[in-house]
Image (cartoon, rainbow, N blue to C red):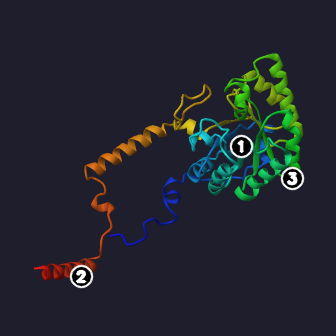
Amino acid sequence: MGTGSIRRGGGALEDIVSIAPVGEPRQKITVASLREKKLQHQPITCLTAYDYASARLVDEASIDIVLVGDSLAMTMLGYPDTLSVTVDEMLHHTKAVRRGVKHAMLVADMPYGSYHVGADDALRNAARFVKEAGTEVVKIEGGEKRADLIRRVLDAEIPVAGHIGLTPQSVNVMGGYKVQGKSLAEIEQLMRDAVALDRAGVAFLVLEGIPREVASMITAEVATPTIGIGAGPDCDGQVLVFHDILNLTFTPPAKFVRRYGDAAALITDAAHAFREDVIAHQYPADRESYHLSKETQQALETVLERKRGMRR
């Protein structure tokens, strides 16, 4: 008979899900170590995470960068795109992720509207991500037109990641989620964007939805590490959305998505099995129930017997 607490040792994550590898202690990933990886031609890994559990598992899998992407608008909150998510919603999820990350670099997206109105708003919101949520780097979409703004944020001692190519916050201007950099004029603009952000001093540069050949040219041209998503294998690193690699989205995946597991099937099967066990009175079993001590049970039976005698 168990007499202890319902959850011991801090809960299920600490006791069950931890997959920290045994071996040499991991080094904290920093802006400097990312640049060193590029110099040493060591691939950089990045995954999104939106809560404590996913962040902890991704961090313990030795992923280099954990990104709290504004994609949480769709994956976690059910919005149709990234435009609706607010700073407060992003901060809420980033705080949870912060608690699960120890070694990876923690990066958070600045959501739409948080830096578009003016530099003062951008600085104020970027500072909130650092002070309130423990973000180490904020990510801002846009090319050379954002270079001055990025410098302002950097002057406030806040590292910034750039993001060019298919920028989801510009979906209405682009007319949808379309591959960018397909014409010579677009390629020239992407190169200017990349060089401008590189000179501004971004921590790394996300290249999304552009031809492999263009991403390769940019990667060779800039000193900052490039992280690709739908940009081919020649970038310095790769990023994918946590829910995409686990089949936890409800829309057809993009061409560049590779699924590494089927959590949707696992969750669905588990939910069905739970329902069937409850309906069949198979859950909970006696071994999954708590019991009175023998002494208390005997005392309770004595009391109940007296009450039954009084009713006769």
Image coords of residue 111 (percent x, y): 71, 43
Q: Amino acid at mark 1?
A: Pro
Nearer to the camera, 30 or 249: 249
Q: Residue at x 75, y 58 (%)?
A: 131
Looking at numbered disc 2 in the image, what kind of residue is underneath it?
Ala
Mark 1 vs mark 3: give the one in front: 1
Q: CA distance from mark 2 to mark 1?
A: 62 Å
- SS of the residue at dot 1? loop
Q: Earlier in the sequence, mark 2 or mark 3?
A: 3
Distance from label 2 to label 3 (Cα)? 69 Å
- Under circle 3, the secondary element is loop
Q: Earlier in the sequence, mark 2 or mark 1?
A: 1
Q: Is residue 87 left or right of residue 184?
A: left
Where residue 210 sits: x, y (%)? 73, 25
Q: Nearer the viewer, residue 266 or 60?
A: 266
Query: Which quadrant of the figure contains the N terminus?
Result: bottom left
**Amino acid marked by disc 3:** Ala
Q: Which residue is mark 3?
A: 156
Q: Dot 1 corresponds to which residue?
A: 111
Residue of label 2: 299
Of residues 81 and 133, the one drawn nearer to the viewer in this rendering: 81
Q: Position of residue 211 (x, y in %)?
A: 72, 22
Q: Residues within 10 Å of mark 2 (few under 14, many from 20)?
A: few
Check disc 2 and report its element: helix, strand or loop. helix
